[in-house]
Amino acid sequence: MKRGFFIVLATLLLLISFGTSVECQPRLRGVRYVRSLKAPDRKLARAILRTIPDFPARNMSEPEARDPETWIRYLYNRVDLNGDGNPEILAWVYGKRVSAATGFEALIFRSGKGEYKLIGRLADVWTPVIVGDRARNGWRDLFVWVAGGGTPGHYVGVRFGGQRYSGADGSFEAYAVAHQTEIRGIAFVSEEYSSGFKGVVLKKRM
């Protein structure tokens, strides 16, 4: 009984934190907000699963895994980050089984003829992911919302490092944004939790 109570409590706290991350951030005047794509993408799902090697243990090992509120989901959009005419994929993966008080992972994939290649793994961030108007090293700057763990919520900038947006472990070099009103660009995976769309469910068999 106690175990069930704590599971419910943890789920509620996760939903509250997710809703807060999306809906309590100030909308920026210089930013256009775009809703996530809703159609499941099998190639993207396979690419995300490669970043979660213990996915079966996380998602399917316990009886309460049948509860939809515990499932791992992803929000995603396509956007050309380097101006070559081929869109990259921005995905934000969240759920009780990959939860963290300081956020979840935003993944950036480069598309190609084969499988998607991971070129960015930004750990502990919230939605939205803003693609800035300015480019450095031929790739657009990104802006992500960081908060939690006693840190007041704020946007930070992320630059392309020549090969990737981040280290393989999800660490990334963020630069400070003096005034968030200076951010210009398009916000992706900007879904409001109250909209009813909670993302695409991540499944093992793709």
Image: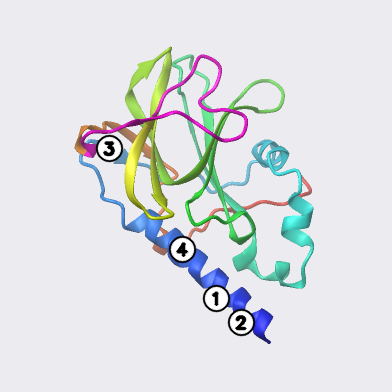
Quadrant of image for the C terminus = top right
Q: Earlier in the sequence, mark 3 or mark 4?
A: 3
Q: Pointer 3: residues within 10 angstroms few (<14), some, or many (20+)? A: some
- SS of the residue at dot 4? loop
Distance Cα–Cα, label 4 vs label 1: 21 Å
Query: Can you give x and y, in whole percent of width and height, for residue 57 in the image?
Result: 78, 56
Q: Which residue is mark 4?
A: 196
Which contiguous range is marked in magenta? 158-180
Q: Nearer the viewer, mark 4 or mark 1?
A: 1
Q: Is residue 169 above or below residue 15?
A: above
Distance from label 1 to label 3 (Cα)?
Answer: 35 Å
* First in residue order: circle 4 vs circle 2: 2
Q: CA distance from mark 3 to mark 4?
A: 23 Å
Q: In the image, is residue 194 part of the stretch drawn in magenta?
A: no
Using residue 109 as the reference point, say whether residue 185 is left or right of it.
left
Tag 4 and tag 2, C-beta contact below 8 Å: no
**What's the distance in space between the residues labelled 4 and 2, CA to CA?**
25 Å
How much space separates mark 3 and mark 2, taking CA atoms? 41 Å
Find out whether residue 169 is within the magenta segment: yes
* Residue tagged 2: 5
Q: Earlier in the sequence, mark 4 or mark 1?
A: 1
Q: Residue furthest bottom?
A: 1
Q: Quadrant of the N terminus?
A: bottom right
Earlier residue among tags 1 and 3: 1
